[in-house]
Each structure stands twice: as C-alpha cells, then as structure tokens.
Image (cartoon, rainbow, N blue to C red):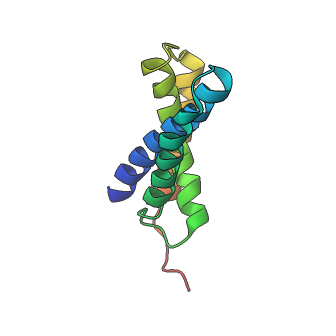
Amino acid sequence: MPSLLAFAGAAGLEIAGCFAFWAWLRLGQSPLWLLPGMAALAGFAALLTVADSPFAGRAYAAYGGIYIAAALSWGWLVEGHRPDVWDIAGALICLAGMAIILFAPRAMPV
C-alpha cells in the first residue's frame, strides 16, 4: 500500500504543479504561480521514489494509471468538468493496468 499512497500524493502534486503553469500561461495568472508550481513538481518527483519497485520505469508506468484517475478527478473537483462514462471507463482500464504492473507476482530481479 505505500506505493499507492505515494502515487496518490504524487498525482496531486504533479497536477497542482502543472495547473500552476496552466494558470499562468492559459488563464493569465501571475508568474508567481510558478513558485508553488515548481515546488509541487519537485515533491511529485520525490514521492515517486517511494514506490516499491526495483525499476523506475515500472514505477512510472504503474503511476500512470493513478495519474489518469486523479487528473479526471481534478477536472471534476477543481475545474467543474464532470467525467463522462468514457472518461470513467478509460480510467478504470488504466487502473486495472496499474494493478497488474504493480501487484503481479514476479521473481526477484537478477
């Protein structure tokens, strides 16, 4: 479970950090938004190192499923864009992929 918590926290930080850039470039907010945005992105990167995976690529791939679900949740909760049935179906498929990548029984790496 520590990986899932790390991924959830990382997703929140990544989306918040990227949204800070979006707010600056697309919504006309102050460039000062970049300061907390960059801090959030640094926290995101640090949290990904907590994942219980011997390989960075596998951790990042599994994280992708969590990120997709979190991004759709952000869109709904922060931006007021409710996901439709296709968004939800896609997120569920991605979460299934994440679970396979993260929880599949594997032999120890050589």
Is 49 above or below relative to 78?
below
Give the farthest residue toward the left.
1
Q: Which of 25 and 56 is in front in this view?
A: 25
Percent from the top left, x then y, of residue 48?
48, 58
Q: Which of 51 and 87 is in front in this view?
A: 51
Is 63 above or below relative to 54?
above
Q: Which residue is drawn at 53% across and 56% down?
A: 101
Is 23 above or below relative to 59?
above
| Residue 74 appears in the figure | yes
Count of residue discs: 0
Q: Which residue is drawn at 46% across and 43% down?
A: 13
Q: Which of 39 and 103 is in front in this view?
A: 39
Q: Residue at x 45, y 48 (%)?
A: 10
Q: In which quarter of the image is the C terminus?
A: bottom right
Q: Which of 64 and 106 is in front in this view?
A: 64
Q: Quadrant of the N terminus?
A: bottom left
Percent from the top left, x then y, of residue 19?
55, 32
Q: Residue at x 47, y 46 (%)?
A: 40
Percent from the top left, x then y, of residue 39?
48, 49
Give the farthest residue toward the bottom.
110
Percent from the top left, x then y, of residue 26?
67, 23
